[in-house]
Image (cartoon, grey):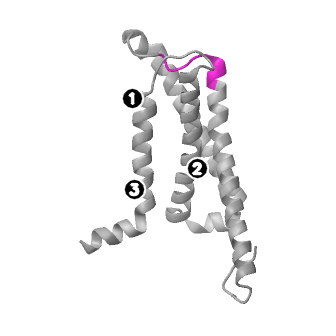
Amino acid sequence: MGSISHWFKNRWPLVIFFLYWSVHIYIWLIWGWKESELFNFAWWFDEMGHALSGVIGALTLLYLYKTYSLHGIFRFAGKKHLTKDIVEDIAIFGILWEFGEMVWDLYFQPNFLQIAMAQKGVIDTIIDLIVNPLFALLTLIIYFSCVRFGRYVYKKTYPDDKNTADV
């Protein structure tokens, strides 16, 4: 039992991310996929899914990069490179997702008319492609700002501690 608790102690964010993505896929892909008009409730629900995938996708990639990636490149290149890389990854995933929706609408949906179409038009696709990386970028800006503010507060609270990094 000790080995399971030790594994979970070090990897609990992975479990949380896995649970979130499982629920996200169920809600936005299986349960909540409905045909909608632009700017109605179902469309806003879809956009909320894209925004959450940008936010949680950025946090997931940030955790994976900081924990399991080669640390040297991100320490050398800095936060700007890490932010750019994560936002690009989220944008590429969004492009692949929209491509999958297009393939669904062209080839599979005509055979299953009871299932909704994935894309609502060019405007919907463009907005989806903007929302994913935009929310990923906002999440990373807020994250790095909070880290910087936390270091500043810690340095002001404990001015004699020499183990803190410069702000």
**Between 88 and 11, which is closer to the camera in this rendering?**
11
Return the residue at label 2. Answer: 58
Residue 139 placement, left or right of 112: right
Tell which of 47 and 83 is nearer to you: 47
- Say what secondary structure mark 1 lies in: helix
Picture quarter with the N terminus = bottom left
Residue picked out by circle 1: 30
Mark 3 or mark 1: name the one nearer the start of the chain.
Answer: 3
> Which residue lies at the image location 53% right of the left edge and 17% below the top edge?
36
Residue under label 3: 15
Tell me the distance, in whole angstroms, between the alpha carbons under discs 3 and 2.
16 Å
Q: Is residue 30 above or below residue 135?
A: above
The reply to whether callout 3 and callout 1 are in contact (CB within 8 Å) is: no
Magenta-drawn segment? 117-125
Residue 130, numbered label = none
Quadrant (top left, top right, bottom left, bottom right) of the C terminus? bottom right
